[in-house]
Amino acid sequence: MEKKRVVIVGAGVSGLAACKQLLERGCRPVVFEADTGVGGVWAWTLEGTALQTPRPMYQYSDFPWPETVTEVFPDHRQVMDYLGAYARRFGVLDCVRFGHRVAGMEYVGVGKEDVAAWDEWAGNGDAFGSGSSEWRLEVADGEGHIERWIFSKFAESYYSIPMKKYGMVPDHSLFEALITCLIAITPKDHYKRLEEGSIVLKKSKTFSFCNEGVLVEGESSPIKSDIVIFGTGFRGGQKIKEMFTSEYFQSIAVGSASTTIPLYREIIHPKIPQLAVIGYSESLANLYTSELRAKWLAHFMDGGFRLPSISVMQNDVQKWEKFMKRYSRAYFRRSCIGFLHIWYNDKLCRDMGCNPRRKNGFWADLFDVHGPGDYIDLHPKKE
């Protein structure tokens, strides 16, 4: 690959994987990270947080956990150390500009009418387009100063009995939980602490504040509170939308309330040229999935394959949307690949011209667990 300059927004698990893969393909990536270190959302989690994905499934394919980490579910410090070691090992740290937040993105060189009329992604189906257009970024440093950058191109056990006892049985089924990534492992000693009363659950649709603390719907007395934490989740779609200065891109970036986020292979927006999104769509092992997407993207950018026409990609997105609405119902906009992980991986492998059968033997490929190590050799380094 010609040494193209590529911008990556964020040094979380997806950004690190993308940077490493692009470096190996001969690109010149630069990573803008608003924080002072790598890790993304991990940098902001509480120190007591631990993985909910078993360690062997939460690692980069060519970078196993150190032997000193023996826990099945490593904690916050161990995850941060692991991500930092990965970034140092593969030269990713040298590409990161810490304390730099991308404040806006503008596509210049081609008008929105022309972009809307294209039959091929980026005008000609090439990763870097025809060379007549580029992304212009506004980047704010730690002191709020705005810098302008021009790039040509790319922008992360189900227990019914205790649940019923404590009123925690969800409205969705186990199948829906699996397919929408709503399933989770409860923290250590969670039910023990419920039993002893150190954790008290209050189920309510609404609440309000008062002088003494929080007043919960259906309760006559307020809950006396010193601190209130809002666990409201992360609106990734809104974050993507707000990145664009163009009203046209804002209007199409994340679809509508009645559609899924329109990403082909959960990576490429058919109507937004020369931009990729890695890490928005969830899986049951996000790091593992993000790395495979980064390999797919690097392969595409290196000319390994071409994208189909915009109409074909849009049809593929619509098929995925119908599937999500059928099986995920109210949670279809989560765009979680859930237990279709292997089916999804197979699609990425076929796009790259790689054999999707990653095990030795027919039965092993059907029934053995697939993990990061099965995809280590998809992108051997070029001499």
Image (cartoon, helix red, strand yellow):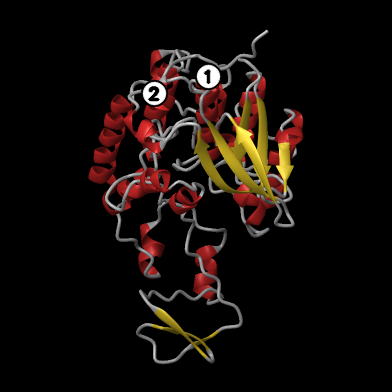
Q: Nearer the viewer, mark 2 or mark 1?
A: 1
* Residue type, numbered disc 2: Lys
Near-viewer residue (33 or 57): 33
Crowding around mark 1 (Cα neighbors within 10 Å: few <14, some 14 to 19, many 20+) is many
**Looking at the picture, does residue 316 appear above or below residue 36?**
above
Left or right for 203, reference 223: left
The quarter of the image holding the C terminus is top right
Q: Nearer the viewer, residue 146 or 180?
A: 146
Under circle 2, the secondary element is helix
Check disc 1 and report the residue beneath it.
299
Q: Which mark is residue 156?
A: none
Inspect this view and state whether residue 55 appears: no
- Quadrant housing residue 315: top left
Left or right: residue 292 versus residue 47 is left
Residue 318 placed where, x, y %?
Answer: 27, 36
Q: CA distance from mark 2 to mark 1?
A: 14 Å
